[in-house]
Amino acid sequence: MSESNLTDEPVVVVKDKKQSLTKPKTQPPYAVIIHNDESHTLLYVIELLQRVCGHSRPNAVELTYSVHLVGQATVWTGNLEVAELKRDQIRGFGPDFYAERPVRFPLGVTIEPLPSG
């Protein structure tokens, strides 16, 4: 066989059908939920929501009253890693000096996966 015969042959590329049909799986969104207690002040929660979650003051006030009246509220949603960060930032936000006696324990906060739609 001559060299020209080897290079003149067409190249056939075979794709794996399973590989081309699969789509990357997306992670379900998570909710950061704060819980009401009788120790933290409304002002503390409002400030926390503005600084940690980036809510506007009116939205932070609305969420704070929802927590106070209902017992809990979802204050942020997104991917798991950021939800964990927000939870940790809320837990580490510091004492509530607005209270008559400073409240030194963290505000109750949990993260939960949201139902997939």
Image (cartoon, rainbow, N blue to C red):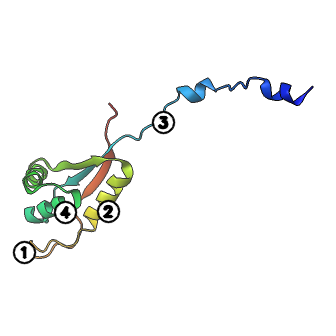
Residue 22 picture location, percent across and down? 52, 29
Q: What element does badge 3 sit on? A: loop
* Amino acid at pointer 1: Glu
Residue 51: image quadrant is bottom left
List the residue tagged with mark 2.
88
Q: Distance between the residues labelled 1 and 2?
A: 25 Å
How far is mark 2 from mark 4, CA to CA?
13 Å
Which disc is residue 51 wearing? 4
Earlier along the polypeptide chain: callout 1 or callout 2? Answer: 2
Left or right, residue 104 beside residue 4: left
Residue annotated with mark 1: 100
* CB atoms of marks 4 and 1 within 8 Å: no
Mark 1 nearby-residue class (10 Å; few <14, some 14–19, many ≥20): few
Q: How far apart are marks 4 and 3 (CA)?
A: 34 Å
* Residue 69 at x, y percent in the picture: 8, 49
Where residue 24 sits: x, y (%)?
48, 36
Sequence order check: which comes first, mark 3 or mark 1? 3
